[in-house]
Amino acid sequence: MTATAKGLGEMPQKFKGGDRVLIAKDLGPHMRHFPANCEAIVLYSYKDQYGGDDTDSFALHLVGRGRCSWYYSNQLTLIEAGK
């Protein structure tokens, strides 16, 4: 049962566009082909771009590498909040 279904409200989004984050070294076996252990800028969450309830998947601009989607909030550490 989701938090919304339990009446607790929507889960807050951990990151917002413009936040500078560090991508974890270990993304797990299903994402071993994704760039890891590098800095990125959050572009948007899935919900921000497409609607729905997914506030845990993020499109990122990887510094020096370009855009990549979808990373999960537990794979990201905030370095600096966006302005």
Image: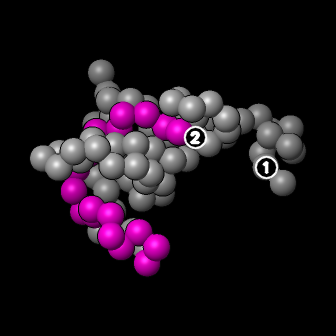
Question: Which of the two residues, 82 or 47, is positioned nearer the viewer here?
Answer: 47
Give residue 2's mark. 1
Which quadrant does the N terminus fall into?
bottom right
Could you say which is closer to the camera, residue 79 or residue 67? 67
Spot occupied by residue 70 in the image (x, y as percentages of width and height): 44, 51
Q: Quadrant of residue 23?
A: bottom left
Q: Residue 65 appears at what percent x and percent y?
A: 17, 49
Which kind of residue does numbered mark 2 sit on? Answer: Thr
Q: In this view of the protein, which residue sits in the foreground, 2 or 68?
A: 68
| Residue 42 location (% of width, % of height) | 35, 38
Is 54 placed above or below 9 here? below
- Judged left or right of residue 32, residue 13 is right
- Element class at badge 1: loop
Q: Which residues are magenta?
A: 29-46
Residue at left offset 28%, top offset 63%: 36
Which residue lies under the disc numbered 2?
A: 55
